Image (tube, rainbow, N blue to C red):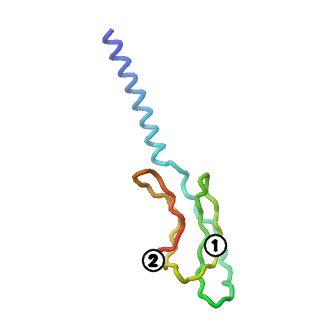
Amino acid sequence: MTRSLFVAAMFGVALLAGCSGQSNTASALPFPPVPPPMQEAIPKPPVTGEQLLWQPGHWNWNGNGYVWQPGEYVPAAGHGNLFQTGYWEQTATGWRWVPAHWTS
């Protein structure tokens, strides 16, 4: 009786070890990778009295998948000098999508 209980316990441990390996792989990639940027032609800027910056197109996460946000001219005032595309960031509570933004 003790031997069969030991064998059953070892079998259960082996099964759980196999399951936990699959779960670690799944938690390492909880989302699909961000697609490469789409090629887009940069049009001439509109004629305006304010200085404009070209904000390149980028992928945004809408909760179900990535959606392409086309590039556009935006007012230069209030923006940093470097555009950071969106990316996934791992936090203590899980993964968080950081949308594309200007950095200072």
Is 1 above or below relative to 52?
above
> Where, by quadrant of the figure, is residue 66 drawn?
bottom right
Residue at the farthest left position: 2
Q: CA distance from mark 1 to mark 2?
A: 20 Å
Left or right: residue 13 versus residue 100 is left
Residue at horizontal 47%, vertical 53%? Answer: 95
Identify the residue under disc 2.
104
User: Percent position (x, y) of residue 29?
Assistant: 49, 48
Label 2: which secondary element: loop
Return the residue at label 1.
Answer: 71
Q: Classify 10 Å Cα crowding around label 1: few (below 14), some (14-19), many (20 and above).
A: some
Q: Is residue 56 left or right of residue 47?
A: left
> Outermost residue toward the top?
1
- Nearest the viewer among 39 and 82 is 82
Q: Reply above or below: 27 against 66.
A: above
Residue at 64%, 63% in the rendered image: 68
Q: Is residue 1 above or below residue 30?
A: above
Q: Which corner quadrant holds the C terminus?
A: bottom left
